[in-house]
Amino acid sequence: MLQRRQFLRDAALLGASFTLAPFADYAQGLGPAAPFISQRPALKDRRFTSKAIEAQISKVQKKIKDPELAWMFANCFPNTLDTTVTVGEVNGKPDTYVITGDIDAMWLRDSSAQVWPYLPFMKQDPALERLITGVINRHARNVQIDPYANAFYQDASRTAEWRKAETDMKPGVHERKWEVDSLCYVIRLAHGYWKAGGDPACFNKDWLASMQLIVKTFKEQQRKENPGPYHFQRVTKWPSDTAAAAGNGNLAKPNGLICSVFRPSDDGTVFPYLIPSNFFAVKSLRQLAEMTAALFQQMDFAAECTALADEVHAALKEHAVIEHKKFGRMLAYEIDGSGSFYLIDDANVPSLLSLPYLGAIGPEDEEIYQNTRRFLLSHGDNPYYAKGTVAEGISGPHAGKDNIWPMSVIMRALTSNRDEDILNSLKTLKATHAGTGFMHESFNKDDASKFTRKWFAWANTLFGEFIVKIADEKPYLLSRPV
């Protein structure tokens, strides 16, 4: 409810442009659609259509015996392509602009995650491959504009006049909240694309320069000698929407970890060492080392990436694990390096819960992860685990303690191999889409019709990814009504 709703109100008052066209009926308050009528835009109104994705939708739907679940999958899986992408060229090279849904801006994190589930299908569809190439190209250009920014406009000359903040706002930047995971997601998509056999032409000198800037930024935010060049302040009703300590974020004792002033939810951190994002950074740096050695023979830079990954990983081993009197050795969510820690989880990704999904935690940490997971999924221990009359699951500070995130429900299943966990998540998601056929940012634990964000493409695409995974690995779970 909170920041993004305020965003939409402020944007409307100040003339910022965004569109809710694909969901106009809901926006006008006409209520949910009739059961199982496709909620996709008409074919002529879709932003992009992929033959490979359409074939996958048909293939998976045949495995789903629950008609409502099959309908939800068909609405959600192509939602990013249907409603959020603008495909074109810049200087003769593919260019793809991806909005989050109800906000006309491209988040590095969201855009990477939104197209991630399409990677396995791009070799069957050259146009889809070109679209993802365009995302990688735009990511590289955006990082060059400002590696500390988390969201950008399509027009690199556009200025965010309505978003007043005391920070170094550059043309083309929508939001300048420093979040470690934003740059990790840039690397994750590029590495996944490369491993899936994508055309390597996008990995050129400009892309490499952007990767070098990412590593430079990570090192600056280790803050070994000073806070670095980043600062951010804003006049706001919400303390989490600005940065403490004169815009630098709360103090932290240097220990090798990377400071993140904001979380993936775009809320400010309590303590700057955000543990899930640092685990993600270790994984991303190792991926970047692999790519630059193979594609550019940049052995010195690859060694620099590996050394930084090793340093951050060693710091995580030493500082991120706390001893909980009930759950034993487990991961803190945030720390300050001086002994203070914060025990919650945010429902966005990266989160502590999502670390196995991101491949960011190894088998050697399985016991610590499982202890952490038990805490995260414990009502009464995790203050942001909500349990109500319609559902239970992880909520978070961003949308409020009583608002469960579908993303956290999905992630609970994606990080488990237990049939019971997967089926429970399916039942929860089916019971809480409020008749819309789509995922939302969050819904109230006692009334799913009270939800935030009608049009949140990342959550929709993640739901599609979840169903595809079940269809591939455990199709018997889809062979009967949920």
Image: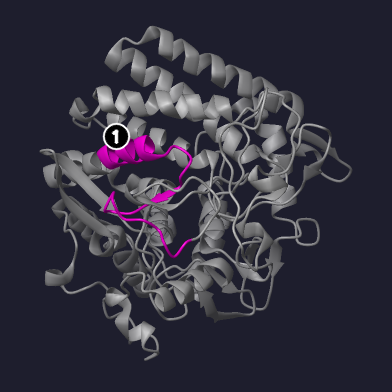
Q: In the drawing, does residue 418 fall left or right of residue 78? A: right
Q: Which residue corresponds to mark 1?
A: 193
**Residue visible at 61% across and 63% down?**
235
Specify whether residue 46 is painted magenta: no
Q: Position of residue 45 (x, y in %)?
A: 16, 71
Res. 433 in view = no
Q: Position of residue 327 (x, y in %)?
A: 81, 43
In which image quadrant can residue 69 be found? Answer: bottom left
Q: Nearer the viewer, residue 61 or 130?
A: 130
Quadrant for the N terminus, please: bottom right
In this picture, which residue range is highlighted in magenta? Answer: 136-163
Res. 50 in view = yes
In which image quadrant can residue 234 be found? Answer: bottom right
**Residue visible at 80% across and 61% down?**
380
Q: Nearer the viewer, residue 312 or 216?
A: 216
Measured along the vertical axis of the image, is residue 4 above or below residue 91? below
In which image quadrant can residue 153 be found? Answer: bottom left
Amino acid tagged 1: Tyr
Measured along the vertical axis of the image, is residue 375 above or below residue 320? below
**Residue visible at 72% across and 34% down?**
368
